[in-house]
Image (spheres, grey):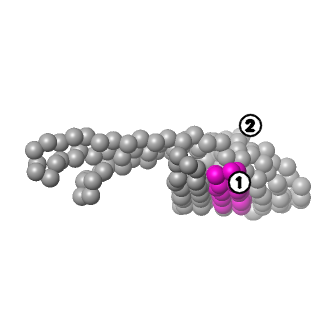
């Protein structure tokens, strides 16, 4: 894309998580668990512009697309505490780092939530999540990196059976 071109960019992503937890320290009002799992991330990005020649006579459209589907394994810790009034506090940390040949990267996810359980099968909560993924590629035909972060509040409900 030439300098001074007006470029429109779009990024879309989906993340799916599957994890197994084992409570290695369990008491009546709290437990601490180790977990192992995987994130499956799908990233799609595109850039598009209409480019006009400097003399203003002709225009052409330019577009670039990229996508990445990546399974990302994780390990982590989780703590849960039962509070009065059907409330529970949950804190978790998950991470993974790898370096294979010309590729390296890491993933981190930290989350804290407070859940109100008005029924045994229904929970309503709020929390905060901080997610970060970083990757580098340095091969003969491609050099690049990905720095992707999001953080912010969460409002959610849960159903159990």
Q: Which picture quadrant has residue 110?
A: bottom right
Q: Position of residue 12 (x, y in %)?
A: 46, 44
Q: Earlier in the sequence, mark 2 or mark 1?
A: 1
Which residue corresponds to mark 1?
Answer: 98
Relative to 92, residue 122 above or below: above
Q: Is residue 93 magenta?
A: yes
Residue farthest toward the front in the current orientation of the protein: 140
The answer to which of 37 and 53 lies nearer the viewer is 53
The residue that appears at 82% across and 55% down in the rendered structure is: 33
**Residue that appears at 41% across and 41% down:** 65
Please name the residue shown 79% across and 44% down the image. 20
What residue is shown at x 14% (from left), y 53% (from top)? Answer: 54
Look at the picture and state if 18 lies above or below 83.
Answer: above
Lateral position of residue 72 relative to residue 33, left or right: left
Q: Tell me which secondary structure the magenta stretch mostly adopts.
A: strand
- Magenta segment, which residues? 88-111
Question: Which residue is most to the top?
Answer: 161
Please tell me how many numbered marks the rendered image carries. 2
Disc 1 on helix, strand or loop?
strand
Q: Say the numbered circle drawn on residue 161.
A: 2
Q: Position of residue 137 (x, y in %)?
A: 58, 52
Kindly report the distance in space between the C-alpha atoms of the residues bearing marks 2 and 1. Answer: 36 Å
| Residue 67 on image: x %, y % | 49, 41
Q: Which mark is residue 148?
A: none
Classify mark 1: residues with Cα within 10 Å, few (<14), some (14-19) or many (20+): few
Query: Can residue 153 be seen here?
Result: no
């Amino acid at each position: 894309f030439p300098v001074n071109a007006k470029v429109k960019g779009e990024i879309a992503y989906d993340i799916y998580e599957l994890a197994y937890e084992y409570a290695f320290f369990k008491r009546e009002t709290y437990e601490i668990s180790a977990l192992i799992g995987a994130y499956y991330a799908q990233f799609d990005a595109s850039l598009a512009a209409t480019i006009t020649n400097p003399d203003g006579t002709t225009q052409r459209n330019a577009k670039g697309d990229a996508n990445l589907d990546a399974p990302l394994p994780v390990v982590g810790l989780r703590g849960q505490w039962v509070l009065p009034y059907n409330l529970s506090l949950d804190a978790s940390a998950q991470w993974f780092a790898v370096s294979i040949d010309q590729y390296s990267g890491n993933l981190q996810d930290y989350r804290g939530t407070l859940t109100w359980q008005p029924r045994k099968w229904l929970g309503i909560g709020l929390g905060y999540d901080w997610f970060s993924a970083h990757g580098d590629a340095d091969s003969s035909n491609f050099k690049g990196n990905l720095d992707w972060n999001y953080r912010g509040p969460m409002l959610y409900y849960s159903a159990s059976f």
